[in-house]
């Protein structure tokens, strides 16, 4: 039997990773007995790991790790599904925890699971009692696809049935395994030179919900009577906490320790402890404490390990502790109640016989949940599933295939960017410094990196954002308008930029206000946005209006009560409607007497307006204009952009050259918003067809994406591809790429979560 495991894995420092490793080692051996046969008959079990990487980090994995998935990279999940299906694996075992998978509430794992062609066993490490809509939907879908669902507490079974409507027959209870390693307390204390100490211990990943301060506050009263007490806190700060808050919690604990004069009685070891060393610390301890702050913890590996080591355990009554410490296997105290904890500690330290009895009960129970026993139960379950000959799943047809898209890369954008902004043009893949900078491209660049950070949590993208935002701020005039062009020597080249550049800037700023990476970005963006806002009603260019509408729409998504800005949106949408009514006819459903550049941006702006204003007339006109544009540019099954050589004048001939990437981007954005509003899958087909224009599905059947430079060529001319790779083209490609990935995620969510 061959097994494929999906989860985090050492050397990544993660509790789920330790669990996955122990499960793998306890199952994948050459001497695992089939429970359905006699003990003399052995069954060989083999397997491999698909390891989850976080935030672009990579690890020196052991040989059993055959593939890795980058948490926020959708294509990696699909590659993994294909790899597993072709690996010869009989069953996939998934370790599920919301935070280790990408997308909102870990939704990126769903496309992988949906494409598996082998049975699925899922171990649930977290079950939320009051889930958000998405948390519930994601877990329900995982449970629907699983052949068996393994939980490690009886409370988990109740929650799955009552809240998530999971079939009871699918759920299997298997205790959290513990290492089958034994050390005597005397030997362990001697090794750590702690023979004269009474050791209290807490270990694991450190974060505020661990409640360690509760123990520290309980110590003064205990130490008065037992001055030999030492409280050891072993473990590193949770990586997500480090990214957002640094060592704020650990520093707070140190300050608290100092203020209570406990420096000689509390020891912090800021390390991720290896399993063998951890077993020694557990054996050396007299009492293990889990002082978690709320009940909503369905599984605690640290608690299981403490029992397995035969340690006396005191805990707050979170779900797993209430079960595991029943029948006299431990003591419970109320959440955040240092006084009650002090009383229990004193009782146990004052009565060595009671403490010894508690340790024995823990040890006896620990012997029943060692990893070989838990692993054997998993093997038996896997054999049971295979014996039932489950139906092989058929891989579903997809409307969007991220696997045929080049990997997303900021390489060319980094090449074009200096400390002032993004260079406007390039000679082939090399920045053309002679042309300097422009507002249009820095606004597009800001939009792109904000989208990248939102979808991929890419730190490089976030590092680029202040460069583009500061350029925008520098180019703003006192009256709120913007200059556009700046030379490489940083000389202004105009007084007021085009209305198009104004609108694109408002679009980027509006997106920033709806998706701020931090308050500093929000406050800066808000200042620039509202300084510019008096100029909104002065706009005359319909594309300037359309781009501004996009910015206002994004702003209003997070500020829906701003009635003044809502009215401005209504007025600008009204201007576009009037242009449409003045120029459209039975055979020409458009805003002008010609199709020019960036055409899709006009229906797109109305689609956003219709969503914000809930206006049926605006929506009807937007869809009507979109259909007209589609019939002209997608009539042969691929995108054929209106060339800017001569445009397409009503009743005239359309220009084939020069086709530009910014037009493909506008079409992709337009179809994405149409899908968002209507949920009609036909718009996803059109969206992906438009994206494939970049990769060769176009009039010249040539790719504009450069696989060497990771840039995008500037378009098609009558002589062929314009090989220059300026900022506008490359940014149009990257924003398009991100929109396709976002659309794919939304489709999977809609298709899988019903």
Image (cartoon, grey):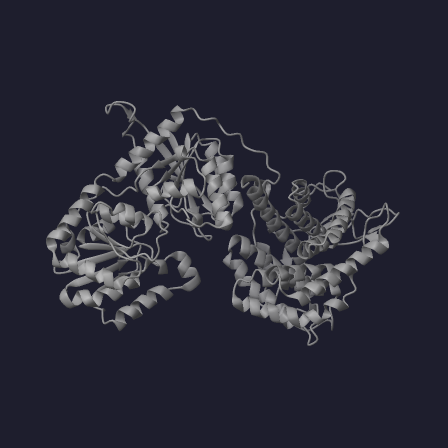
609 lies above or below 77: below
Vertical relation: 716 (above or below) 165: below
Which residue does the image show at 63% across and 57% down from the upper left?
Answer: 430
Quadrant assignment for the C terminus = top right
- Which image quadrant: the N terminus? top left
Percent across and percent down for residue 477 are: 69, 74
Q: Is residue 71 left or right of residue 408?
A: left
Judge by depth and name the residue closer to the eye, 9 or 216: 216
Residue 680 appears left or right of 4: right
Q: Quadrant of residue 628?
A: top right
Residue farthest to the right? Answer: 651
In the image, residue 713 sits, relative to residue 232, either above or below, namely above
Q: How many numbered marks are there?
A: 0
Picture quadrant of residue 404:
top right
Q: Nearer the viewer, residue 537 or 504?
A: 537
- Residue 92 coordinates in the image, percent (x, y): 42, 35
């Amino acid at each position: 039997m061959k097994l494929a495991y999906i989860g985090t894995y050492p050397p990544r420092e993660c509790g789920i990773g330790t669990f996955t490793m122990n499960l793998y080692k306890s199952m994948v051996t050459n001497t695992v007995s089939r429970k359905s046969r006699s003990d003399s008959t052995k069954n060989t079990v083999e397997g491999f790991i698909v390891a989850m990487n976080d935030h672009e980090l990579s690890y020196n994995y052991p040989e059993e790790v055959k593939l890795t998935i980058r948490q926020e990279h959708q294509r990696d999940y699909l590659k993994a599904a294909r790899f597993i299906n072709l690996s010869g694996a009989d069953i996939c075992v998934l370790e599920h925890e919301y935070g280790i998978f990408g997308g909102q509430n870990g939704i990126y794992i769903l496309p992988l699971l949906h494409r598996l062609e082998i049975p699925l066993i899922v171990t649930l490490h977290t079950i939320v009692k009051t889930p958000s809509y998405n948390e519930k939907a994601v877990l329900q879908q995982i449970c629907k696809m699983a052949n068996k669902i393994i939980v490690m507490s009886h409370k988990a079974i109740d929650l799955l049935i009552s809240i998530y409507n999971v079939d009871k027959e699918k759920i299997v209870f298997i205790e959290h395994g513990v290492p089958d390693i034994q050390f005597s307390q005397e030997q362990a204390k001697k090794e750590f030179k702690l023979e004269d100490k009474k050791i209290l211990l807490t270990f694991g990943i450190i974060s505020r919900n661990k409640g360690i301060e509760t123990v520290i506050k309980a110590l003064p009263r205990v130490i008065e009577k037992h001055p030999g007490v030492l409280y050891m806190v072993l473990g590193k700060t949770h990586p997500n906490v480090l990214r957002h808050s640094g060592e704020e919690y650990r520093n707070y604990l140190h300050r608290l320790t100092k203020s209570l004069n406990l420096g000689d009685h509390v020891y912090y070891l800021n390390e991720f402890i290896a399993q063998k060393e951890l077993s020694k610390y557990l054996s050396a301890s007299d009492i293990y404490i889990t002082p978690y702050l709320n009940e909503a913890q369905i599984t605690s590996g640290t608690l299981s390990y403490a029992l397995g080591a035969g340690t006396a355990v005191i805990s707050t009554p979170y779900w797993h502790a209430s079960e595991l410490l029943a029948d006299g296997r431990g003591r419970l105290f109320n959440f955040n109640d240092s006084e009650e904890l002090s009383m229990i500690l004193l009782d146990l330290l004052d009565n060595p016989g009671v403490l010894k009895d508690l340790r024995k009960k823990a040890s006896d129970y620990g012997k029943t949940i060692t990893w070989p026993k838990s692993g054997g139960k998993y093997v038996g379950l896997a054999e049971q599933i295979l014996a039932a000959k489950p139906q092989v799943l058929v891989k579903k047809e997809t409307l969007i295939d991220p696997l045929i898209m080049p990997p997303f890369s900021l390489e060319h954008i980094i090449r074009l960017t200096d400390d002032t902004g993004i260079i406007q043009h390039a000679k082939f893949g090399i920045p053309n410094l002679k042309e300097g900078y422009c507002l249009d491209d820095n606004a597009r660049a800001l939009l792109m990196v904000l989208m990248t950070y939102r979808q991929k949590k890419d730190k490089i993208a976030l590092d680029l954002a202040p460069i583009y935002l500061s350029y925008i701020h520098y180019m703003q005039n006192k009256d709120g308008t913007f200059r556009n062009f700046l030379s490489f020597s940083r000389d202004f080249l105009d007084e007021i930029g085009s209305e198009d550049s104004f609108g694109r800037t408002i679009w980027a700023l509006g997106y920033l206000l709806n998706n701020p990476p931090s308050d500093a970005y929000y406050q800066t963006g808000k200042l620039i946005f509202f300084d510019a806002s008096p100029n909104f009603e002065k706009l005359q260019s319909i594309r300037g209006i359309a781009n501004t509408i996009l910015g206002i729409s994004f702003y209003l998504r997070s500020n829906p009560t701003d009635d003044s800005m809502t009215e401005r949106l209504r007025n600008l949408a009204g201007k576009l409607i009037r242009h449409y009514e003045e120029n459209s006819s039975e055979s020409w459903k458009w805003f002008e007497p010609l199709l020019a550049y960036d055409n899709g941006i006009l229906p797109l702006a109305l689609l956003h307006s219709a969503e914000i204003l809930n206006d049926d007339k605006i929506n009807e006109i937007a869809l009507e204009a979109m259909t007209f544009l589609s019939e002209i540019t997608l009539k042969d099954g691929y995108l054929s952009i209106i060339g800017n050589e001569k445009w397409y004048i009503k009743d005239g001939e359309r220009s084939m050259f020069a086709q530009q990437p910014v037009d493909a981007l506008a079409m992709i954005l337009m179809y994405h918003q149409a899908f968002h509003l209507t949920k009609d899958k036909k718009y996803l087909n059109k969206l992906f067809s438009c994206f494939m224009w970049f990769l060769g599905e176009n009039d010249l059947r040539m790719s504009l994406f450069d696989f060497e430079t990771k840039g995008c060529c500037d378009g098609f001319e009558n002589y062929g591809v314009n090989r220059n790779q300026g900022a506008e083209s490359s940014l149009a490609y990257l924003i398009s790429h991100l929109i396709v990935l976002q659309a794919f995620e939304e489709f999977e969510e809609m298709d899988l979560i019903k």
